[in-house]
Amino acid sequence: MRRFVDDDAGYLDWLAAHPDGFVINTLRKPGPAYLVLHRANCSAIGGLPTYGRQWTAAYAKICGDRDELEAFARQGLGGEATLCGRCLDRTVTPGPHAPPAHSYPVPQPGSAPARPPQLERRSPRTAPSPAHTNIGIATRPAGPLFAPPTSDPLRLDVQPRLASWNTAGDPDQVRLQAFLAAAERVVRPRLETLADPLVLRLDVGLPPATPLLDQHDLDNYLFPLVTHLAKRTGRRFVSAWATKQTSETSWVRVEQARPVHGSPIFDRPYTVRTTASSQSSGFKQQIHDQLSAANPLPDGPVWLQLAFTVGPQRNWTNLWKPTIDALDPILGSITPGRSWHPRDGRIIELGLHCHIDAALGNDVIVTITANQPRTGSGYAQR
Ligand SMILES: [Zn+2]
C-alpha cells in the first residue's frame, strides 16, 4: 500500500504500473468522512488533471489492492470506503465484495441547523385557468423528466450568490467565486460516488428582511453553480432544481438523475418551439409569441418547471435565462410595455430538465408548467 501526497509524478507512475490496482481518494489528512474507492484506471482519479488541478495536493491518494485498502479504511481510519459511481457501480461489480451501505455524514457543526425544505407533492390545481392547455406550434410531449432530489442535503457554509456579469475584481464577482469554491468543496466528495447523468438541487435560505417574491431569481443562483461544477468536474447535469425561503441555512443536493414517466410534475403544460440562437432576441420573441394566448397567473408565489428538448450540440444551461425572460405572458411583467422583464422573482421553486433529441438540430422545444401553491402550503407568502 502506498500513499501519495504532493507527488503527482509518483502517483501517475504507480497508476501506470498497476492497471488492475485500486485507489482510495481521501482528504490530505485522511479521515472517515471522505473515503472513495476507485479502480486505478478510473477517469475520475487519473489522466491529465483539468484546469491545472493536481491529483495529490488537496486530496491524498492511497493505492494498493482492494482488500488491503478496504481493511485500512475500516481499521486504520475508522470508516467505510464508498464505491465510486463511475468505475465501481454496484450493478457492474457484485463480486465477493459486498458494497458498504452508502452513508454520508452531513456536517452539522455548532447549533443544530434548520431542516432543509421538503418539496411538496403536487396535486392538480383545483381551479385551472382556461389558458392552461397545450398551445404553441409543437405538440410533442416533454420527457422524460427527472425527479426532484430528496437525498440527504449538504449544508452550505457560504451564502449562495447570484450570477454576476461584472469583471473579475468586482466585489460581487469575488463573493460569487468564493461561494462556488465552497460549494464545490462540499459537493465534490459526493459527486465522486455518483454516476452520470446528474441532478442538482439548491435550497437558498434568505434573511428575514429579504422579500421572498422579489428578485433573487432562482435561475440566477443555479446557472453559475451548475456551469462551475460541470466545468470543474466534467460531469453531466441533466436537471437542476432550486427553492428559496426565509431561513438561516442553505443546502445543496446532488444525485444521479432519475427519470419519471407520466409524472404529475407537468400539469397542463404549454409547449413552445424555437429555431433562433439563444443569444438573439428572436429566441425570446418566438417563445413570447407562442405564449400570447396565456393568461398571467394571479399574484403570489409560483412553481415553475421547464423541460428543454435540444439537439446534442446545444448547451442547455444557456437557454434558462432567455426562456424565463420570455415568460411575461405567464408571470406578468415588472414594467408593462417593456419586454423581457417578467415577474420571475416570485418563482419560489424552479425545476429544469434537459432531454437530448438528435433529430432536433438547432431547434429547441420547451415544455412549461407554472403553478401556484395552494394557500396554507407552508411557504411563506410575502
Ligand atoms: Zn472511479
Image (cartoon, helix red, strand yellow):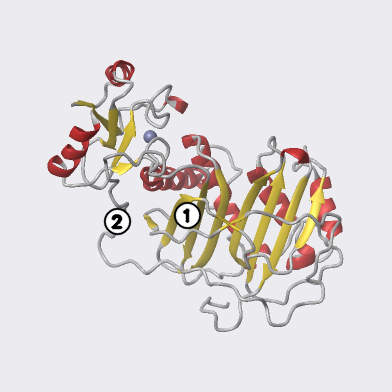
> Mark on residue 107?
2
Q: Secondary structure at mark 2?
A: loop
Q: Secondary structure at mark 1?
A: loop
The quarter of the rendering in which ligand 1 is drawn is top left
Image coordinates of residue 323 in percent, x first then y, are 73, 53
First in sequence: mark 2 vs mark 1: 2
Of 16 and 128, the residue lying toward us: 16
Q: Amino acid at mark 2?
A: Pro
**Name of the residue lying farthest toward the left:** 75
Image coordinates of residue 348 in percent, x first then y, are 58, 67
Image coordinates of residue 287 in percent, x first then y, are 81, 54
Q: Which quarter shows the N terminus? A: top left
Can residue 106 be seen here?
yes
Q: Which numbered disc, 2 or 1, marks the residue closer to the eye?
A: 2
Q: Amino acid at mark 1?
A: Pro
Residue at horizontal 20 percent and vertical 47 percent from the top: 79
Image coordinates of residue 133 in percent, x first then y, are 80, 69
* Left or right of 70 on screen, residue 9: right
* Left or right of 338 on screen, residue 26: left
Residue at horizontal 24 percent and vertical 33 percent from the top: 66
> Mark on residue 42?
none
* Left or right of 106 on screen, residue 310: right
Q: CA distance from mark 2 to mark 1?
A: 18 Å
Judge whether 183 appears above or below 235 on screen: below
Of 322 and 33, the residue lying toward us: 33
Residue designated by label 1:
160
Label 1 C-beta lies within 8 Å of the nearest ligand 1 atom: no
Can residue 217 be seen here?
no
Judge whether 59 appears above or below 140 on screen: above
